[in-house]
Image (tube, rainbow, N blue to C red):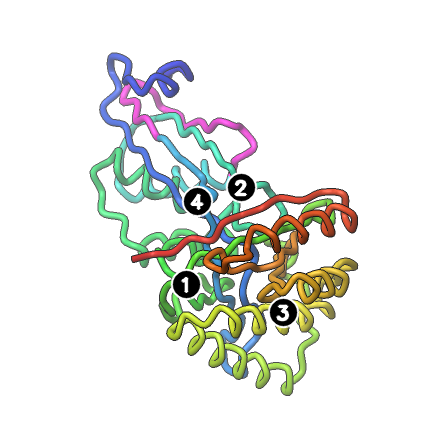
Amino acid sequence: MTTHAHLLTGTAPPGVAAVGVSAAFGTFGELLQGVLPEKDGDFLVTLPVARWAMARFELDPGADALAVVPPHKKKALRLTSMIMEDTEHPAGGLLVLDSTLPEGKGLASSSADLVATARAVANALGEAMPPRRIERYLARIEPTDGVLYPSVVAFHHRSVRLRAKLGSLPSMAVVSVDEGGSVDTVDFNNIPKPFTAADEREYARLLDRVTRAVAARDLAEVGRVATASARMNQVLRHKWSLEPMIDICEAVGGLGVVVGHSGTALGILLDTAAPDCHTKLTTAAQRCQELAGNVTVYRTLSFH
């Protein structure tokens, strides 16, 4: 088996047939998440952020087992095994994951791990790994965020399939707090949804609004939809700091509040192109620190 030192230096030891490297970004919660009045109606709208999961896979023809570092990344190891079985490679290998995404907070850390893994393993094997193929693998493992696509997307996370690519947004800052603890994605998605038919119709209206807002690059409307979705999600996973965060957002002139619907993180959206963004960010961070005792600032991704 290869050594961790080889992974750090980027060199492949004797006997290693191939090395594959890849990465996938995370998201800060969701701009919108709910249920539409249709079959397979569970959906979300992504908010990509500049935090990544990195994967490196070294194929080892001399080994007959697969291993992962860190060892608790068992879903990524299972995915690697599935890909190896499908491609009939009678070999072992070592998968190493390194992520800047906190786990269990609603920032798509597990989805990013799995997408980066699929691409890294495919690169090592010389296999094509288009998004639809990744979706088919991930549907066998867990509900998944739409981090396969370099875009803001509407995504059916429970069935793991793309609904629509909505486009790209100008960069925003996210001044965030964490309520603590962690949420298991699989467990959360097994909770019965208490949404009514009227709620489902409202989610359809919100999806239409955010679709048009992303197309128009209208950050103010994006923020309003995010706040509305956060409030509707309170019946499913209540966040004690949501209304205080909305108050802070309104006081500093932020765009809206975005949450990890299946996580513990909340964030105030700010337009980084605004001339007073630094002042707003500083004030929001101070107020958030007083509220929750922790603050992290994220930057959203724009795609061209």
Give the quadrant of residue 168: bottom left
**Residue indicated by mark 2:** 101
Say whether residue 10 is left or right of residue 71.
left
Name the kind of residue labelled 1 in the image.
Leu
**Residue indicated by mark 4:** 114
Nearer the observer: mark 2 or 1; the answer is 1
**68 is within the stretch colored magenta:** yes
Q: Residue at x 27, y 28 (%)?
A: 19
- Among the two numbered marks 3 and 2 on one chain, the one whose residue lies closer to the N terminus: 2
Q: Which mark is residue 169?
A: 1
The percent position of residue 300, horizontal first and vertical second, equals 47, 53
Q: Is residue 207 above or below residue 120?
A: below
Say whether residue 87 is left or right of residue 50.
left
Seen from the viewer's position, the closer of residues 81 and 293 is: 293
> Label 3, label 2: how many angstroms apart (C-alpha)?
23 Å
**Residue indicated by mark 3:** 227
Q: Is residue 296 above or below residue 271?
A: above
Q: Residue at x 65, y 56 (%)?
A: 266
- Among the two numbered marks 3 and 4 on one chain, the one whose residue lies closer to the N terminus: 4
Nearer the observer: mark 2 or 4; the answer is 2
> Label 3, label 4: how many angstroms apart (C-alpha)?
29 Å
**213 is within the stretch colored magenta:** no
Name the kind of residue labelled 4 in the image.
Leu
Under circle 2, the secondary element is loop
- Among the two numbered marks 2 and 1 on one chain, the one whose residue lies closer to the N terminus: 2
> Label 4, label 1: how many angstroms apart (C-alpha)?
25 Å
Q: Which residues are magenta?
A: 57-74
Q: Is residue 35 above or below residue 293?
A: below
Under circle 3, the secondary element is helix
Nearer the observer: mark 3 or 2; the answer is 3
Under circle 1, the secondary element is loop
